[in-house]
Image (spheres, helix red, strand yellow):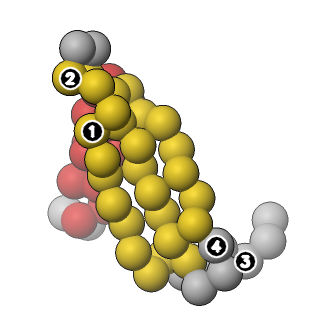
Amino acid sequence: MSDPHKITEIFVLTKSTQPLSGIVQINTADEEIRFEITEDLAHRICTELERFLTR
């Protein structure tokens, strides 16, 4: 596995409210990457981040 890139900024934008979906934009020093996200995936990411923050 290659070395991870350092995230410099992150943005979450609402794409639609019905059904809830959005765009997660992650910026690094070299590039800007955009991902489409659903409400279900957003909850899963929150769970993983909570687990990370409470270790």
Q: Which residue is mark 4?
A: 31
Q: Specify the amino acid type for callout 3.
A: Asp
- The residue under label 2 is 17
Q: Residue at x 56, y 77 (%)?
A: 28
Is residue 37 placed above or below 31 in the rendered structure? above
Q: How many marks?
A: 4
Rendered residue at 41%/50% (across/down) = 24
Residue 38, x across and y down, in percent = 37, 27
The image's mark for residue 14 is: 1
Q: Earlier in the sequence, mark 4 or mark 3?
A: 3
Label 3, residues with CA under 10 Å away: few <14, some 14-19, many ≥20:
few
Residue contact between numbered discs 1 and 2, judged by CB atoms under 8 Å: yes
**Amino acid on which the number 1 mark rests in the picture:** Thr
Q: Earlier in the sequence, mark 4 or mark 1?
A: 1
Q: Nearer the viewer, mark 4 or mark 3?
A: 4
On the picture, is 26 further left or further right than 20? Answer: right
Q: Which residue is mark 3?
A: 3
Q: Earlier in the sequence, mark 2 or mark 4?
A: 2
Inter-mark Cα distance, 2 to 4: 28 Å
Looking at the image, which residue is at 45% across and 57% down? 25
Residue 44 visible in the current orientation: no
Measure the C-alpha gap from mark 4 to mark 1. 21 Å
Dividing the image into 4 quarters, which one contains the C terminus?
Answer: bottom left
Q: Residue 22: in sight, yes or no?
A: yes
